[in-house]
């Protein structure tokens, strides 16, 4: 008869799995941590009260060190910032990043690894999870326990509660709109240490098959769509890129970001980085204004968490009115010019 007993090793392993230590994969730009990555830190801090949070940054040049200082003070729960400084990380390519996460995890033995659910996190986290042989859980909107998470399914029409029962690390992407960052007062800032990641074992083969070619971005003074307090969105009903300028003008007057439906993007009125929805950006601004948007479920999936929704549509039965707080049945070609005329110049 075999008698089950706990060896010191199994006791050690069970204590590891209970304690929470999290690695947050952070994206930075111009010497600052991007807002969705700070939300990932906020999500990490809700995993457990005694969570020890490390933030991983990679890049090269002086802006990386500035970003490290920002990461150290971006949230009171951050205890450590790990910096991987190498030309290999000049651009956030998935292959070297995934290898870096693997390397850092081998040394740190984190219980959780979290990234924001944007193109950065969606690109890196699944590859890193494959290297670490665990299944990632994506698009988390709520953390109930350190292994119990809520995520939307069916384009946000149902919420699914998932228990992670796999080995460490539990790898997550979080929806940044669901984890707002509370204002950090000067006296609650953390005293996080900053250390360099030892890349001596990283190896040349860590550079993968993809290659950075170029970045094409639009210079705009408008707020970033993902973080804007106000979003003004136009749909197919605008009919042309020229007419879409009305939406842009309105956004300018309101200090808002511009959004678009997939139909408007597919018709070439605006570039696809403005698309809101299931296959576009997820937004949750204070105010979301939708002009000539029918309210297809794939669009609602990206904006239904907005605090106040205003819709203008000439069809009184348009589904957008089911989620709108304020609805106006009318022709946008009359409503927008009137709004522009009545609103004061900025
Ligand atoms: P329409 O559905 O054509 O609606 C136009 C609306 O404008 C109508 O309600 C009409 O009454 C109104 N209108 C017309 N003229 C006027 C006027 N003069 N004044 C006022 N109102 C007017 N869509 C997204 O938006 N985002 C996504 O991420 C997304 N992902 C998708 C993923 C998949 C897998 C699939 C299958 C679809 C996806 N779609 C997405 C497409 C989605 O199903 C809809 O086709 C799209 O959202 C419709 O865009 P729309 O509201 O601009 O156009």
Image (tube, rainbow, N blue to C red):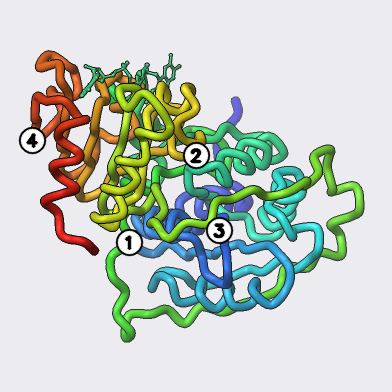
Spatial distance from mark 4 to mark 2, Cα to Cα?
27 Å
Quadrant for ligand 1?
A: top left
The image quadrant where one finds the N terminus is top right
Q: Are marks 4 and 3 in contact (CB under 8 Å)?
A: no
The secondary element bearing badge 4 is classed as: strand
Quadrant of res 67: bottom right
Q: Are marks 2 and 1 in contact (CB under 8 Å)?
A: no
The secondary element bearing badge 3 is classed as: loop
Q: Residues within 10 Å of mark 3 (few under 14, many from 20)?
A: many
Residue of label 3: 26
Quadrant of res 336: top left
Residue 273's tag is 2
Spatial distance from mark 4 to mark 3, Cα to Cα?
37 Å
Residue 326's tag is 4
Expressed as whole percent of the image width and height from the top left, the position of residue 16 reads: 54, 53
- Please give the name of the residue rendered at 30% of the width and 19% of the height, measured from the top-left corner: 297
Give whichever of discs 4 and 1 has the lower sequence position. Answer: 1
Residue of label 1: 181
């Amino acid at each position: 008869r075999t008698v089950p007993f706990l060896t010191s090793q199994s006791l050690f392993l069970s204590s590891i799995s209970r304690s929470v230590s999290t690695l947050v994969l952070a994206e930075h730009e111009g010497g600052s941590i991007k807002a969705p990555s700070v939300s990932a830190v906020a999500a990490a801090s809700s995993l457990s009260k005694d969570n020890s949070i490390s933030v991983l940054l990679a890049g090269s040049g002086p802006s990386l060190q500035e970003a490290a200082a920002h990461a150290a003070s971006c949230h009171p729960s951050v205890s450590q910032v790990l910096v991987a400084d190498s030309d290999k990380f000049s651009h956030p390519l998935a292959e070297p990043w995934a290898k870096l996460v693997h390397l850092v995890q081998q040394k740190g033995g984190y219980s959780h690894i979290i990234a924001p659910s944007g193109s950065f996190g969606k690109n890196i986290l699944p590859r890193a999870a494959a290297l670490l042989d665990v299944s990632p859980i994506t698009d988390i909107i709520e953390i109930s326990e350190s292994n119990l998470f809520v995520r939307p399914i069916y384009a946000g029409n149902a919420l699914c509660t998932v228990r992670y029962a796999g080995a460490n690390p539990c790898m997550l992407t979080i929806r940044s709109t669901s984890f707002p960052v509370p204002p950090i007062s000067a006296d609650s800032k953390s005293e996080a240490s900053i250390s360099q990641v030892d890349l001596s074992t990283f190896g040349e083969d860590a550079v993968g098959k993809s290659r950075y070619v170029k970045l094409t971005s639009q210079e705009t003074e408008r707020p970033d769509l993902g973080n804007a307090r106000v979003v003004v969105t136009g749909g197919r009903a605008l009919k042309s890129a020229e007419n879409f300028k009305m939406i842009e003008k309105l956004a300018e007057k309101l200090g808002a970001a511009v959004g678009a439906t997939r139909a408007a993007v597919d018709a070439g009125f605006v570039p696809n980085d403005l698309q809101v929805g299931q296959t576009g950006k997820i937004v949750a601004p204070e105010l979301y204004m939708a002009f000539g948007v029918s309210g297809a479920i794939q669009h609602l999936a990206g904006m239904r968490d907005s605090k106040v929704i205003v819709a203008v549509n000439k069809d009184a039965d348009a589904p957008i009115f089911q989620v709108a707080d304020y609805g106006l049945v009318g022709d946008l070609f009359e409503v927008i010019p009137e709004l522009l005329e009545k609103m004061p110049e900025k």
